[in-house]
Amino acid sequence: MKTSIATVCLSGTLRDKLAAAAAAGFDGVELFEPDLVAAPESPEEIRALAERLGLGLDLYQPMRDVEGVSPAEFSRVLRRAEAKFSLMQRLGMDTVLCCSNVATATIDDDAVSAAQLRTLGELAAGYGVRIAYEALAWGRFVDDYRRAWRIVQQADHPAVGVCLDSFHVLSRGHDPAGIADIPGERILFLQLADAPALSMDVLSWSRHHRLFPGEGAFDLADFTRRVLDAGYSGPLSLEVFNDTFRQTDPVRTARQARRSLRWLEDAVAARAHGDAAISADVALERLTPVAPPRGFDFVEVTAEDTSSVEQLLQLAGFTPRGKHRTKAVTLWSAGRARVILNEQHARDLAPHLSAFGLAVDDPEAQSARARELEAPQAYRRTYAQEHSLPAVVAPDGTQVYWAPASAGDPEWAEEFEHGDPPHPSPVVGIDHVSLTQPWQVVDESVLFYPAVFGLTPMSRTDVAGPRGLVQSRVLGTTDGAVRIPLNVAPPIVSERGLAGAADQHVAFRCDDVVTLAREARRRGLQVLPIPENYYDDLAARTDLRADRIALLRSLDLVYDRDEEGEYLHFYTQTVGQVFFEFVERVGGYEGFGAGNAPVRLAAQGSAPVGVAS
């Protein structure tokens, strides 16, 4: 299908926005009037620029407050409209968005609104223009698309139809089933936006918190399918008001937007499979299907000097599996958990989580899907006789690799030599990888991982830390094999010169975390100290026996439980910008001990750096 994006979605000048939309592969744009008013180029120059870029000018918007008004006010509407229709002729545009009245409406009468739209449509037709009438969610009298359609029916003019906007329908909880009653040829335009589930006034929600498809809580696949079922064959167009997107690089935002539509088209096609109701004129392109990852293949920590991380892993009982044949890279393992320490191209860099790998059923299909979504590729030099692992760069800069799932060591592990054979460990694998996101990319990440790798949004939690609110969104597989919490934290710099609130971490799953904690302490591992007050509170709010609380206290273990099971875990101290967590899940517990996070954050803010006594 053809795709379009409203210029209001992007930052920069109108020229910048058009160039970004074209570079991202959009077929057209909705021209937002304030962008044109502020542009130094003439309408003819904008038209020519769009033609050179291969962009259609699909919709001029918005024309506000055109119906439900007094005769005197409607005379002013017609004068304004004639000027806009003349401008649209200069631009070569044929469709204008007219919003339901929010400011000047004084007559709550469908017949009056219909008559005024009929007159407006007659004027528009003389300029070769169509009126796409939209019910704003905060319209004074008309705030429901079904009423807007009834008014259009009464207007009964070929130049007057409706515009359907997913936000205005879904934010008000209106039933989209009524879309089936609108003939496809009378749906003149479709605008799409996602949004988080918020409880606030709908105008503020709309103006500041819209998202691209797949980034929020709306079921846009269902909504879009209903519009296509009705016979609509115009472009899928994005109209997203968002404070973040209006501050970030327009080229990157446009690519993010285009990826969201590519994902949405696939999601709609998946639901419409075998459904003859969708018009034969609508070609929905599918993405290469992939199964969700089977688990984590490895995590990678990069630094100029990784010796401090090596020491930490050794004290935690990991086995050194050897050095890479050609690179300054070492491999450590415990159970099925593999940690790569990379000192290549890392001058002046403190230890940080730079990459992780996923075990997948079909690497070739995964690579094809990543290419189709135009995920930026990661590049690493590979020499002869070495395995080349495909990878992409996530929105936060983390590199994500994939390799065939295997029962034992992966094939690439053969490139590490002169190491020790693995020995038994309470660590069984990687439980989750927690990534702190820059504020401006978290929404993009929420779409990126599900779209590219088939992960599922699992939960959303806000944690009040000692230096500000930490917002966490968890993505993963439904079987728990992969869990990726994405955290947005305040950019706090500690006395040691590191952004402590932005530390990344890897959690290793254990079958006996108490034994691991004891053994690691005996080797000299310094774990993150937990204050006595925590254990006093734990005793007060749970029915744990005194001897069990004493055990937890002695090992600096923290504890959580729900109706399904228990969660025991402890943290290492931070090295550079990374720390490790060791967890044991008992029963069906699926959380992350969110109630313990403020204690951990406070302890990290005051703990000294170090791994050994």
Image (spheres, helix red, strand yellow):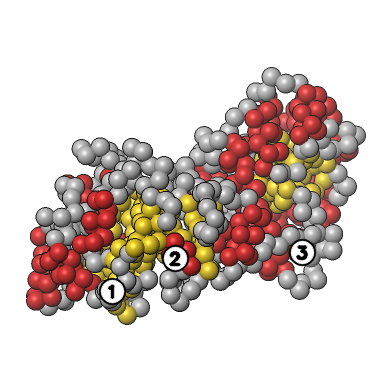
213 sits to left or right of 4 = left
Q: Earlier in the sequence, mark 1 or mark 2?
A: 2
- Which quadrant of the rendered structure holds the C terminus? bottom left
- For marks 3 and 2, give the one nearer the viewer: 2
Label 2: element kind:
helix
Amino acid at circle 3? Asp
- For marks 1 and 2, give the one nearer the viewer: 2
Q: Is residue 281 above or below residue 41?
A: below
Label 3, label 2: how far apart the Cα atoms are: 53 Å
Label 3: element kind:
helix
Q: Earlier in the sequence, mark 3 or mark 2?
A: 3
Amino acid at circle 2? Glu
The image position of residue 373, as x and y in percent, is 63, 54
Label 1, label 3: how far apart the Cα atoms are: 59 Å
Residue at 47% x, 42% y: name it. Answer: 440
* Residue with the mark numbered 1: 423
The image position of residue 609, as x and y in percent, is 19, 47
Residue 125 visible to the viewer: yes
* Residue with the mark numbered 3: 229
Instruction: Kindly give the residue lying farthest to the right in the view shown.
Output: 126
Residue at 20% x, 65% y: name it. Answer: 558
Residue 561 visible to the viewer: no
